[in-house]
Image (spheres, helix red, strand yellow):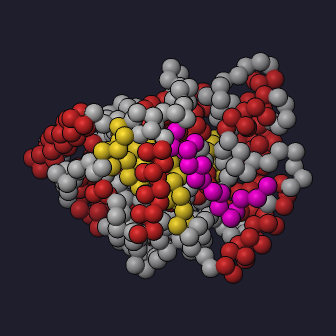
Amino acid sequence: YTKPMQRRHLLALLAGATACHRNAPFAVEEADITTLGDALRTGRITSRTLVESYLARIHAIDRGGPRLNSVIDINPDALAIAAALDAELAAGKDRGPLHGVPILVKDNIDTADRMKTTAGSFALVDAPTPTRDAPIVSRLREAGAVLLGKTNLSEWANIRANRSTSGWSARGGLTLNPYALNRNTSGSSSGSAAAAAASLCAAAVGTETDGSIVSPSSICGLAGIKPTIGLLNGEGIIPISRSQDTAGPMARTVRDAALLLSALRGPGQDFAKNLNPNALRGARLGVARRYMGENPHVNKVADQSLNTLRDAGAILIDPFDMTAFDFSFEVEILAYELRAGMEAYLHQRGSRHKSLDDLIAFNRANASTELVWFGQEFFEMAARKGPLTEKPYRDAVAKAADLRQQFSAAMDRERIDAIVCTTDGPAWTTDLVNGDRFGQNCSTPAAVLGLPHITVPAGQVEGLPVGFSFFGRANSDQRMIELGFAFEQATKARRPPPAQFS
């Protein structure tokens, strides 16, 4: 939250940054994917011009002006890709809703091109380029999306240390929140959130292990979808946990997030086709009070959101008791799977670093850049773990499976469609010395149990966005998106950050 004088200074900076767009025939600020697609297909704009417009904003706002620092790498081939897609469209070949649309992807997702894939660490800067795209990147290219660049992130997707600052990486620096430059973006998909919120792309791809899509989406005023584990192919993503890792879309509208999820999934499933503003009517929703109530300002947003649900015809089971669900074993799963998954990835990538021990040693040798703000306690703990055959790991995985059954049974008893609650508190002041100050959040149940989770803008606290969550049974992604869309249409709560001007 910036003071009025700070806001006026920010507005002055950004007014100059966006002046080049005032005389443009088409403004990309806050433009949704459908609007962009219509303009492309009617000839009002080309994909190449779209790329140029977004690149101008990146240079003016992200690398100049307020320096949001959300884009870590720009694709040097983006303009050529856009021109080729323009030629396809002119020849009658239409790949679908994302044809010619610029998308940013997180810097822990492999791309076999001239961009780097580093998870924000200098340890991978000189590693061989991935020999092939991650499957989700291949899907994006097949869908006609233009890979505009890579986004900054909390280094190693925020798994390196027990106390860290979200949005910071040694390679990318600190990503700033476009709603208030002194506030945090949350993470680890920090750059994806800030870039999508500030219209530096049509939409962005993030990844989540526990909260890394939904928390920054909530804090940056976006719709974010953490899919059911396994819905998207997770190969080619620098790993933390095979049980919990997934990519997912982050966008300014639920429909855009659904369109991007459809592209990431591939042909055969259109998550945007059945979106109905009346989908909340008759829906039975369990209110997860366990994850609410700590912040009176957020409680006001929660009360307004619950009233919206009632007015839209939803039936609230309030509270839905989740006190019996203990997720403290999550740390064992993450530590064991981090070591196994990271070492397999490093070998496959051909990195000179072959193990977590190698990465730990690299960080110590380069402490002035890598360890300047926080340490690597979690890396060190994970490096001491043994193989996935060890009993502590097998016990933790068994607990997760048992809780998954218990959770489904509890929802069945009440005939519940989704669990709802506020996603996160408002953004905290960034403090590189003391680290993050997370408040209330609800990401862990869906993360540990592998369930779909969508967050949708619900309101603001002194100009800082707060999201509202829907999560439910495995493979109920379509239903969660439908409920989130209906909530979005009923609230119209998203407000662009001060960086947005037409």
Does residue 408 belong to the magenta stretch? no
In depth, the one of 385 and 128 nearer the eye is 385
Number of residue marks = 0
Residue 361 appears left or right of 414: right
In depth, the one of 397 and 448 nearer the eye is 448
Classify the position of the N terminus by image quarter: bottom right
Classify the position of the C terminus by image quarter: bottom right
Q: Residue at x 83, y 37 (%)?
A: 45
Is any part of residue 415 visible from this angle? yes
Vertical arrangement, residue 184 with respect to residue 89, above or below: below
Q: Residue at x 82, y 28 (%)?
A: 42
**Residue 139 on image: x %, y %:** 54, 30
Q: What stretch is highlighted in magenta?
A: 486-502
Predominant SS along the magenta part: loop
Vertical arrangement, residue 432 with respect to residue 230, above or below: below
**Residue 19 on image: x %, y %:** 84, 61
Does residue 493 belong to the magenta stretch? yes
- Specify the quadrant of the image occupied by residue 367: bottom left
- Specify the quadrant of the image occupied by residue 165: bottom left
Is any part of residue 257 visible from this angle? no
**Residue 26 on image: x %, y %:** 83, 44
Residue 378 appears left or right of 261: left
- Specify the quadrant of the image occupied by residue 41: top right
Q: Which residue is drawn at 49% across and 75% down?
A: 429
**Residue 240 on image: x %, y %:** 34, 49
Residue 19 appears left or right of 399: right
Q: Which residue is drawn at 30% across and 56% down?
A: 289
Q: Which residue lies furthest to the left in this view?
A: 391
